[in-house]
Image (cartoon, rainbow, N blue to C red):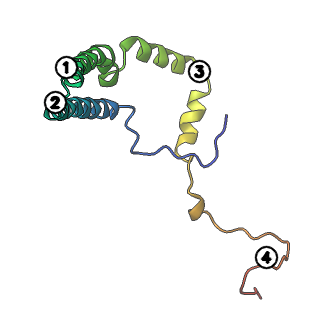
Amino acid sequence: MNFINVYAPKYDTAGKFWPIVHNSMIFSLVLMHIIAVGIFALKKLSLASTLTIPLPVLTLLFNEYCRKRFLPIFVAYSAESLIKKDREDQNDATMTQFYENLVNAYKDPALLPIHYSPNNDSLRSPLIPQA
């Protein structure tokens, strides 16, 4: 399969930014719950305040579950999946050709020379006539 003008961005983080986003969201949720409990207490809404008190605890329990379940995936890939991928690459006959073509795989279209068509369209002809 050939891809033309494909550019892999250098800022790709491979999902390592998601734990930061998750922690920020959990912090914001807990802060929001605490503020809500305070507002309900100031307005003398004891039922709403009482029902809101378990929410930060439940949010922190959910955060702990996510840390145990998903954080190891973001920190490192499993050895089993890496070994499997390496073996697939070793057995793939097209990988040598892929590595050879990798050097010239991307050429920025802005840096390519301009090719004018032989058609003398007024819309496509150069502004300065060539002698």
Give the foreground label among 2 and 4.
Answer: 2
Q: Is residue 91 above or below residue 98?
A: above
Outermost front residue: 44
For the residues bearing labels 2 and 1, Cβ distance under 8 angstroms: no
Disc sitting over residue 44 in the figure: 2
**Mark in the foreground, 2 or 3:** 2
**Residue 44 screen position, x and y as percent:** 16, 30
Q: Nearer the viewer, residue 80 or 59?
A: 59
Instruction: Specify the amino acid type for callout 1.
Output: Thr
Q: Secondary structure at mark 1?
A: helix
User: Which image quarter is the C terminus in?
Assistant: bottom right
**N-terminal-most mark, 2 or 1:** 2
Question: How far separated are the C-alphas under marks 2 and 1?
Answer: 11 Å
- On residue 129, the disc is none
- Is disc 1 in contact with disc 3, using a CB cutoff of under 8 Å? no
- Look at the picture and state if 16 lies above or below 81: below
**Residue at 62 percent of width and 27 percent of height:** 94
Q: CA distance from mark 1 to mark 4?
A: 73 Å
Disc on the earlier residue, 1 or 3: 1
Question: Which residue position is annotated with label 4?
Answer: 123
**Label 2 SS:** loop
Left or right, residue 1 beside residue 50: right
Q: Do callouts 2 and 3 mark residues in contact (Cβ within 8 Å)? A: no
Q: Residue furthest top?
A: 80
Image-quadrant location for residue 82? top left
Give the alpha-carbon distance from disc 2 to disc 3, as whole Å.
Answer: 70 Å
Considering depth in this image, is 4 or 68 the residue closer to the camera? Answer: 68
Secondary structure beneath dot 3 equals loop
- Looking at the rendered image, the disc whose residue lies closer to the viewer, 1 or 4, is 1
| Circle 1 residue | 50
Residue underneath mark 3: 92
Quarter that holds the N terminus: top right
